[in-house]
Image (cartoon, rainbow, N blue to C red):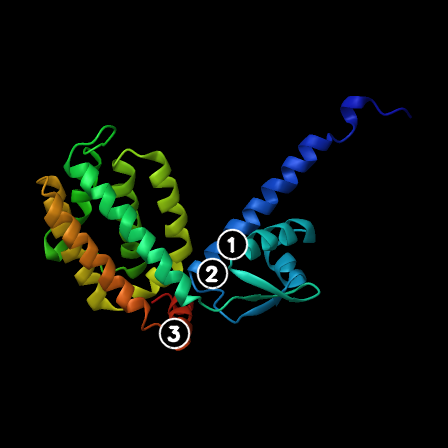
Amino acid sequence: MHTTPSARPKPAAARAARASRSDQVYAQLKHDIADFNLVPGDRFTEMELCERLDVSRTPVRQALYRLQQEGYVEVLFRAGWRVLPFDFDQFEQLYDLRMVLETTAVQRLCEDAAGADRSALEALAAIWLVPQQQRSADRVQVAQWDEQFHCALVGAAGNAEMARVHRDVTERIRIIRRLDFTKPARIDATYDEHAKILKAVRAKRADPASMLLRAHIQSSQAEVRKITLHQVHLARQGVVRGD
């Protein structure tokens, strides 16, 4: 029987489907790393991922190659991979870049620079300028809000390229920033520090806002230097238990 052209698989559609599956696997693996389901030193094979994620090897391999290029994993042997150890020198450089981007964004917001959107500050106030009894104690939620706070400040500054670079930096330091929120004292400190920064920006006090933001980032950076692999494994156990 003759097969009509419309009945044949469309190469473009097939490629799009494969790309979509690869993107899904890539996103899931990054999520696993950020949430400590996969931690530095963990080893796995492509077949194990195929079985766990219920996908074929091609999208798994494509996703792993992307993660390899971004410095998350390395190939050990044929079809065998490992989550890379933390590169603390790189984290230091990323924190320095983050400092430049965020303090520049705060300056632009305080000065009402062209394109700046100060209305975004009100949404942040609804989360961070609340009475102490209304603060969240959920470390996962606070970690997400913390990330959104800093991204919102940079996004509100009105420079799309600055925001794009900052999002990339944010993704690359996500795992170690989340480790910071395994300590209750850091959650309280984040609320206090964010509130002070936000009040200064809303009052258009550029120098105090920049100084407070710089101190806030440096405090987080100092905690990063104390991270040990033992802490990472404790964090994974906390995720598994749902603590």
Is residue 58 at least partly visible in the picture? yes
Distance from disc 1 to disc 2, alpha carbons, whole Å, reads: 13 Å
Q: Position of residue 66 (x, y in %)?
A: 57, 51
Distance from disc 3 to disc 1, alpha carbons, whole Å, reads: 25 Å
Q: Position of residue 178 (x, y in %)?
A: 34, 61
When the figure is inspected, residue 35 is found, relative to residue 100, above or below; the finding is below
Q: Earlier in the sequence, mark 1 or mark 2?
A: 2
Verify CB contact (< 8 Å) between mark 2 and mark 3.
no
Number of numbered markers? 3
Q: What residue lies at 51% left-to-right and 58% top-to-bottom?
A: 71
Q: Which mark is residue 70?
A: 1
Disc 2 secondary structure class: helix
Judge from the rendering whether residue 140 lies leftward or rightward of residue 185; answer left or right: right
Is residue 182 at least partly visible in the picture? no
- In depth, the one of 236 and 155 nearer the eye is 155
Q: Amino acid at mark 1?
A: Glu
Q: Position of residue 208 (x, y in %)?
A: 10, 49
Q: Examine the image and state in which quarter residue 217 appears.
A: bottom left
- In depth, the one of 194 and 52 nearer the eye is 194
Q: What residue lies at 37% left-to-right and 51% top-to-bottom?
A: 170
Q: What residue lies at 42% left-to-right and 75% top-to-bottom?
A: 229
Q: Quadrant of the C terminus?
A: bottom left
Q: Amino acid at mark 2?
A: Ile
Distance from disc 2 to disc 3, alpha carbons, whole Å, reads: 14 Å
Verify CB contact (< 8 Å) between mark 1 and mark 2.
no
